[in-house]
Amino acid sequence: MKQNPWKWAFAILLGLVLGFIVFVWFQVTTPSSDQKQIATQTTQKQGQYANVNVVLNKEQLSAAVNYYLQQNQKKGAIKYRFVLDKSAILMGTTKILGKDISFTLYATPQLDDSGNLELKTKSVAIGSLNAPPSFVLGYIKNNYDLGKWAKINASKATITLDLNQLTKKQGIKIQGEKFDLKQDDLQFKVAFPLSNVN
């Protein structure tokens, strides 16, 4: 019996095409040695941070705090605005008995032992009425959910802004290093996570 050479040629060509497809598929699905090395390095850096020192002036810090206040304010709660000048000024509006009431809190800012921003309240004005800071802070603490980022101690008349709570979702850590309003020198250490990007 005579065999058809076209059948053999087709079978060989089909084998070559299938072999080429398998080779290409294997090359596409196998990670390169660089990718394996980077994945290993990234996994080893889990839990480590890249530290950046940030120096701000009063205007820049006010803008940053206001940005995070807007991002973290709950609907219907107190609406805030933060300004740094010779002291820290926290202005806000809230509803009392269905009426919008504005308030202004004047405080001396400083860093606590953890590097968070602590506002030592000097005075509070509700509308044009001066009120005792401890009373107003106690009222706010008992009647409004400020979230985890603002801690009020009414007896000491302080508000502590936990900087790490503001950026917790992103895994960023912030710690105050120097806070000198007179010299307009505000320094912070910001730690960005070096986490697995898989």
Image (spheres, rainbow, N blue to C red):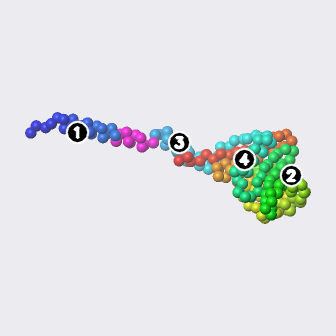
* Amino acid type, mark 1: Ala
Which numbered mark, 3 or 2, is in the foreground of this view? 2
Q: CA distance from mark 3 to mark 2?
A: 50 Å
Among numbered discs 4 and 3, the one appearing first in the sequence:
3
Other-residue count near label 3 (Cα within 10 Å), few / some / many at <14 / 14–19 / ≥20: few
Query: Where is residue 77 drawn, in percent x and y?
Result: 74, 58
Foreground mark, 4 or 1, reads 4
Q: Which residues are magenta?
A: 22-31
Front residue of 77 and 32:
77
- Res 38 label: 3
Q: Dot 1 corresponds to which residue?
A: 11
Instruction: Give how far apart the Cα atoms at labels 2 and 4 are.
Output: 20 Å
> Is tag 1's residue or tag 2's residue first in the polypeptide sequence?
1
Q: Judge depth for marks 4 and 3 and give the one in front.
A: 4
Of callouts 3 and 2, which one flags the residue occurring earlier in the amino acid sequence? 3
What residue is shown with label 4? 67
Return the residue nearer the eye: 73 or 175. Answer: 73
Disc 4 to disc 1: CB gap under 8 Å: no
